[in-house]
Amino acid sequence: MTDFSFSTLPLPQPLLTNLDRLGYKEMTAIQQQALPEVLAGRDLIAKAKTGSGKTAAFGIGLLLKLRSRNFATQSLVLCPTRELASQVATELRKLARFTDNLKILTICGGQPIGPQIGSLEHGAHVVVGTPGRIKDHLRKNTLKLDQVHTVVLDEADRMLDMGFSDDIKHIISHTPSKRQTLLFSATYPKTIAALSADILNAPVTVEVEATHSQNQIEQHFFEFDKEEKLQGLGKVLQHYQPEFAVIFCNMKQTCNDVQQYLRSLGYSAKAIHGDLDQRDRDQILVQFANRSCAFLIATDVAARGLDIEELPCVINYDLTRDAEVHTHRIGRTGRAGKQGLALNLYQPSEAYKVTAIERNFETEFENTDLPGTLPAIEAPPPPMVTLSIGGGKKNKVRPGDILGALTGDAGIPGNQVGKINVYDFVTYVAVERSSARKAEDRLNKGKIKGRKFKVRRLS
């Protein structure tokens, strides 16, 4: 039997102990292929989807090379969105528990630049950020990259889709020519090949099979005329009744149209796209992740960095032109050996997109017919409600403080409290719908860490 444990790699015992505590029992496919190359110091092109374990694949090697006594920036991780950057930084901090005094800093747009400048003045071993804001700091001379030995481009294809190619090259020009560069991408368009040729040195390429077995993800295709498509989506939801799902659209306006239609049917639905400010994006993503919102409607770019555990269903309201992107979309369901469901809508003029997907999956899909008459159903409300608390990390608020305030002295039962997300100046907590009013009253009338904070329910 093949041994895929981390102990087969030349890793220090404190790191192995920490990985075991974090539940990293065996390496994922991308970790098996990428980690030996990363540890050997080689440049790398890795093709892997979200949720494949790629953060550990680059993070372990990155962390082992850090010199904790040197507070200069030694590693830089570039991500397409703030959500992904935050997710990566959180995972790196967990992986870094095997050693002391490592500082990992997130620098992204959509936040005031002043506090970021202050944090950089105190030094950071690892900077995780979005290209636009990293470039801002380089221009202001508040970030130095002259001691960087490792650069990671995470979800490089999306950064290029968002027009960051020139920014990436500009940023990398500030790093030493002798460095290790690791490029991770879910797809491999020609633009990635061109970028790789410019910034990587004799890279090794590893690829994890991106297709999913039909046993793992059940796919259905539905053909609707353009003018019947919205009503068609309603029929699909009525028939399959997914508890919650991501709905992909190709354009921002379509996201808004779908959201408006679903709300008219009584569904809990929210759309994310580039026109939203960062606070609204954060709120919507938190509500979907903690089960306070049933349907998240998004474009591919807006959904990057979204990593929801146990997503039961993905709906492609619009099919993508790229079959690889389709594979990446539906790969958000059917994870960890669980059954997934992908519902795909298309117009007659888009049959060529279905053909491309069939070619990629090496199978043929028959259109699924819906019953002529569907029973009327009332859209159930999401099981959770999100409360917003006007205090966060900068106010020394921790998840345990929120849990204690909700459950202490005959409060609500602990098993009725869901995810708690603490940001710099705001905290979001999910509670079961039946206890939401009591939880809101309790937090508004009580104190957290001896202080009163404004609490409101997110709609």
Image (cartoon, rainbow, N blue to C red):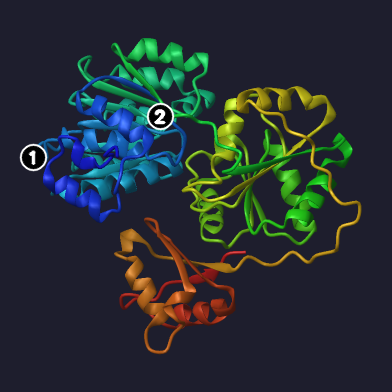
Foreground: 227 or 235?
A: 235
Task: Please state the horizontal and vertical placement of residue 101, each as a whole percent of the image.
Answer: 14, 48
12 with respect to 81 (left or right): left
The circle drawn on residue 131 is 2
Q: Which amino acid does label 2 sit on?
A: Pro
Q: Is mark 1 on a helix, strand or loop?
A: loop
Foreground: 452 or 86? 86
Say which quarter of the image contains residue 121.
top left
Q: Which residue lies furthest to the left in this view?
A: 69
> Residue 300 at what x, y percent from top left?
58, 35
Q: In this view, does 228 lie to the left or right of 362?
A: right
Q: Which of marks 2 and 1 is nearer the N terminus?
A: 1
> Where does residue 50 sit, x and y in percent of width and height?
46, 38
Q: Residue 69 carries which label?
A: 1
Residue 115 shows in the view: no
Residue 307 in view: yes
The relative height of residue 36 versus residue 198 in the rendered view (above or below) is below
Q: In which quarter of the image is residue 243?
A: bottom right
Q: Residues within 10 Å of mark 2 (few under 14, many from 20)?
A: many
Of residues 420 and 443, the one nearer the viewer is 420
Q: Quadrant of residue 38?
A: top left
Amino acid bearing label 1 = Arg
x and y percentages locating residue 282 in the rendered image: 50, 51
Which element type, helix, strand or loop, lies under badge 2?
helix
Q: Which mark is residue 154?
A: none
